[in-house]
Image (cartoon, rainbow, N blue to C red):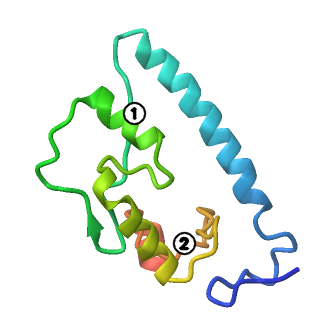
Amino acid sequence: MGVHPRWPHHPADPQPGLGGARETTARVAAAGVAKRLLAEFGITILSHVTEIGGVHIAPDLDVTGEELRRRAESSEVRRGDPAVEAAMIAAIDAKGCEPGLGFEPRAGRFTTRSSSPRRAASGA
């Protein structure tokens, strides 16, 4: 089993990546339930990418929420501004990122700062 040299897994983790898939499944299911519940109150959820690798969408992007949703869902990188999609993809490619590369949000394995005082104190 290969390990990406930049993201080594802890030796005690015999099957890296499997916990991440289980957690993702639970989060996706919970989000689906929350989305339906919020829809009962006329609330919808919208997300889109505003920056990748220093490439930003236009600050004065003036589109409706529905148009922004349509654009994001039709985009490979969920961007709301079609003028920057190619540049965003080029920024990803320039970093040499493999598809699916990311980190697993499991306790003790964070590689970024955390708002949790316990994790921040431990340096995790």
Residue 20 image point, x, y percent: 70, 58
For label 2, the residue is 110
Q: CA distance from mark 1 to mark 2?
A: 33 Å
Amino acid beneath label 2: Phe
The reply to whether residue 123 is in sight is no
Residue 11's disc number: none
Amino acid beneath label 1: Arg
Residue 42 image point, x, y percent: 34, 12
Q: In the figure, residue 6 lies in which quadrant? A: bottom right
Quarter containing the N terminus: bottom right
57 or 102, nearer to the observer: 57
Left or right placement of residue 117 versus residue 10 in this view: left
108 or 35, nearer to the observer: 35
Tell me: residue 112, above or below residue 25. Answer: below
At 59% from the left and 62% from the top, the residue drawn is 105
For label 1, the residue is 70
Numbered disc 2: secondary structure? loop
From this viewpoint, which residue is outermost toward the top?
40
59 or 119, nearer to the observer: 59
Which mark is first along the chain, 2 or 1? 1
Numbered disc 1: secondary structure? helix
